[in-house]
Amino acid sequence: MSFPNLEAAAWFLLACVAKTTVILGIAWIATRLSRRRPAAFRHAIWATALVCVLALPLLSLVTPAWRSTALRQAVVAWTPGQALHASRGADTVPAMVVNAVLLAPTGGKWTTLLLAVWAIGFVVLAVRMAIGLAGLRRIFRESEELHDKPLESTAREICGRLKITRVVLLRQSVRADAMPVTWGAVRPTVLLPASAVSWTEARQRNVLTHELAHVARYDWPMQMIAELTRAMHWFHPFAWIAARELRRESERTCDDSVLNSGVEAAEYAKQLLDFAAALQLAGSRWSSALAIARPTNFERRLTAMLHPTMKRGSMSRIAKVLVPVVAALVLMPLAAVRLPAQDANKFGGTISDPSGLPIANATISMTDKKTHEIQMTTSDNEGKYVFVSMAAGEYELRVMKKGFAEARATLSTFGAGRDSLKNDITLDIAATSDEINVIEPGGPKNGVSGGVTGGVNGGPTGGPEGGVKTNGAKTIRIRIGGDVQSAKAIEKVPPIYPEKAKAAGISGTVILHAVIGMDGRPHSLGVMNNQIDPDLARAAVEAVSKWRYQTTLLNGEPVEVDTTIQVKFTLQP
């Protein structure tokens, strides 16, 4: 498994924990409701649940994602600092959800701490599991191959009755007081004490029936799955409960196999008591082998086998089909579902002004074009911004800051599991606008209007495209940018209404585009509506060229800025 960053791995771990809680919680409820059913049925429930938990991470990576809208809205509704807003109008979208997301200063630290703590716990339990396996290897090396014809004959008979086709190794411990244990999957091993050859035939048969029942049911591999699951979820109480209950039901199921062979419960209970008193579990107490009389859970086993009404049958055919089917119906949707925080892209960048300095407290919004959901955040003192809860889709990006032209862009995200998107944005100085009215009495009653009839042809509509012109001046850098002192007209020369246009009854609005230089003078004057009367345009240009503006300052340095000026010529009857 690979993840683009630690945060994605942390959210994946938390999602697996939540889903594991659901699986093991259902298993716990099911086993509580089936207390009167045979132990084999409860063992099958726990075994299936643990296999599902172990397979869950892999299935979550390969199954198609299912994104729950209800779950996402619930998270938004219950998250502090977020609210739902509904707006409806002619030019707005209905039921718009506004989700404000701010990057906490410790946003990147919790993921590292969480993964480090999880890794430490996993390593500790993995080492403990390895020690247990190493203990089994040592026990095997210290034992000898069993050569006893009656025991071998009894073992072959029981293997045939339990339909065991694998080769079972019978080993004899050098110690007379060693506890009978079983381990192994492909070539399972049953270890008997040195005193086993002198046991009565009934005791030999009971012990072999119990141990070979573990082999027939593949109990040792299932117990290893339980140990691995507990190591992966060492912090989860349900993982410890599941491993304990699996071992408990395993022993009780094997006890039922012995009792179902015709052995009296009281006699078998007495034999187990004798084993517990006289024999010792070989190797470490962390041994991964399945022992017939392990001290833990011994009292419960005796109570269960002496209970006269306890059901001891095996699983029915219906139950063998029902348990995995129900497990699949629970596992597949859980593996496909993506939690809101998990199903997210991380998108961010830096907001800066034309001088390259960062802009703090700029407002950045992302609008999902499909769902119309809006996420908003602000830039920090370094101009950095980030969105941490973006599902895959197409978005409209807007960046707003007073004194600067609004920036817009359309982008697409590619879903969780990809590299984080980055988009650095430079805001242009906002274009200014000005207006002056020239009202003149007279003119024919049915004059000709020379207003804006052809629309705006040519000319910029936003901030200056080429950025700031410094004319070689040295730029002074400060820590934080984005401080704009807007231009203001400090001297306006009123236009003179052209006599020719007045006599012809021509009126209208001249729209001019100009660049206010660093000296406060309008440069590059241009008429934006070329359908206007030429005399009106000439009068407007002559007047505006003499205007003077207060210099626009960016971080204390003069800059050029675009402006749009409207000169309205009006004739009063």
Image (cartoon, rainbow, N blue to C red):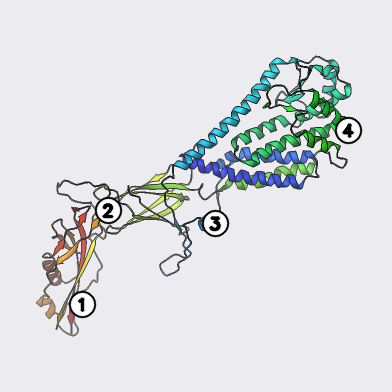
User: What's the residue type where badge 4 is placed?
Assistant: Ala
Q: Position of residue 517 (x, y in %)?
A: 15, 57
Query: Label 3's element?
Result: helix
Q: Quadrant location of residue 369? A: bottom left
Q: Position of residue 314 (x, y in %)?
A: 81, 38
| Alpha-carbon span between mark 4 and mark 3 | 57 Å
| 60 relative position to 299: left or right | left
- Provide the residue designation for mark 2: 482
Q: Are the residues flagged by discs 3 and 1 in contact, CB closer than 8 Å?
A: no
User: What's the residue type where badge 2 is placed?
Assistant: Gly
Query: Of circles 1 and 4, which is in front?
Result: 4
Q: Is residue 569 above or below residue 388?
A: below
| Alpha-carbon span between mark 2 and mark 3 | 37 Å
| Alpha-carbon span between mark 2 and mark 1 | 43 Å
- Provide the residue designation for mark 3: 74
Q: Quadrant location of residue 497? A: bottom left
- Provide the residue designation for mark 1: 449
| Alpha-carbon span between mark 4 and mark 2 | 87 Å
Toward the viewer: 52 or 36?
36
Going from N to C along the chain, the mark reached first, 3 or 1, is 3
Going from N to C along the chain, the mark reached first, 4 or 3, is 3
- Provide the residue designation for mark 4: 266
